[in-house]
Amino acid sequence: MAPLSKLYLQLDDVELPDVIPYSQVSAWELRFLYLLGRHRLTGAGKVIELGSGGGGSTYALALGLQENPDFDTKTKKLHAYDFFRVGKGTFASEKFFSAGTAPEDTNSFLDDFKDKLKPFIDFIELHPGDIWQTSDPEDHTPIEFLHVDIAKTARVFRCVAERFLPRLEPGAVLLHQDFASPRLPWLHYSTGLLLPYIEIAGPPIRSTLAFEVIKPIPQDVLRALAEDAFDTDEKLKLMSDVQDAVDRDYTDGIPFKAVIELAKAYVAHYEGDHRRAWKIAKPLTSNEYLSRTRKDHFAQLEKALNAAEPSGSGSSGLARLVKKVTRRT
C-alpha cells in the first residue's frame, strides 16, 4: 500500500485514456484519483465518491481499482453518490449529458453516466438522489476512501459530517475536491478541527486537498462537526491553523492562504456580519489570483454590505447624498 506522499512522485508520468468522460475536475486530480485506485486502496473499507457528476472522476478512480491486484472487483464496490440530474440545487452541468445538453423530456443524466462507465459498472454501486435520502444513517461500516465533491451547501456538508466522517478510521483517505472554493468555508474549518488526527499528503492538487487519518477521531470532535458547534471566532481560528499547514497547490497556481482568507469572509457573511466580512475581503481585492478568479465573490460580499448598511460606508450615492443634505439642515 503506497503512502499518499509517494503518489505525488508519479503524477507527471500518468497517462489517462482519452475516453474519460467530461469532468469539472482537473487532469491533475484525475491522475491522483487513478493513482489512489491503482496503488493505495484495497477494499478493506468502503470506497465512496460523493458527487460523481458526469463520471470523469469515477472513471479515473475505477480504472485504477480495476488495475489494482489488491482490489477484488468481484466482491468490492465503488459507491457513487450524486443527484445525477441537472436543475436547481444540483450544481450539475448539462455537459454531463452525452450530447452536451439535456434532452427535452428529462433532466437526468443517469443513463449517460451508466453508459460512460460501462467498463466498470459491474463493481459500481449507484446512489442517485438527495444524499440525505440515499445514505443510510444506520450504516457504520468503516470507509477506506472518501472523495467529497458534493458539499456545495452547509446542509449537504452536515450529512457528510454526520453519516460519513465518523466512519473514517486510521489509514482512511479523504479528498476534499472543493478546497479552493471560498464559498465553502465548512471544508476549511472542519479540516482545522481534524488537524491533530490527520496527516496532509502534500500540497493541494489543484483544488483538491488529500489527507490520511492517522489517529482515531474523538466522538466529541465528530459531534461538533455534525452540529457545526463553533462560533465565528472559533471557525476563523481553525481556518488560520489550516493556513499554517497549506500554501500553494502542486502546480503553483492557487495561493491557498489567500483563498482561505477569503473563505473567512464567507464565515462572517453567512453569520450575517457583513461589515466584518467586507473588512476581511477588501484587502484581498489586490491579490492577483483572487482579483482575476473571484470577482463575483467580492461583488457578492460588497453588495451584501451595501444592502445591510445603506447609510454606512458602503452606501449608495443616493443614500450618501440624502445623508449630506440631512446634515446641512
Image: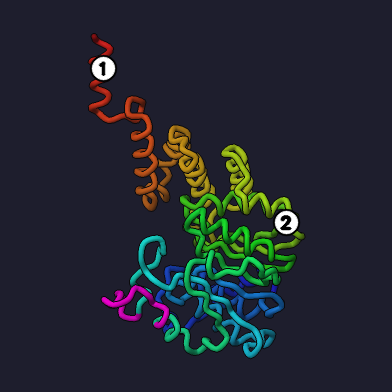
The secondary structure type at the circle numbered 2 is helix
Q: Position of residue 157 (x, y in %)?
A: 55, 57
In the image, is residue 109 part of the stretch drawn in magenta?
Answer: yes
Residue 94: image quadrant is bottom left
Q: Nearer the viewer, residue 318 or 140?
A: 140
Residue assigned mark 1: 324
Decide which of tag 2 and tag 1 comes sooner along the chain. 2
Q: Is residue 125 visible?
A: yes
Whether 89 is drawn above or below 94: the answer is above
Colouring scheme applied when the structure was drawn: rainbow
Residue 45: image quadrant is bottom right
Q: Position of residue 27 (x, y in %)?
A: 47, 72
Whether 172 is drawn above or below 280: the answer is below
Q: Nearer the viewer, residue 155 or 10?
A: 155
Q: Is residue 121 left or right of residue 219?
A: left
Main SS, magenta region, reads: loop
Q: Nearer the viewer, residue 133 or 83?
A: 133
For badge 2, the amino acid type reads Tyr
Magenta extent? 98-111
Locate the N terminus and report the quarter of the image it occupies: bottom right
Locate the C terminus and report the quarter of the image it occupies: top left
In the image, is residue 186 part of the stretch drawn in magenta?
Answer: no
The secondary structure type at the circle numbered 1 is helix
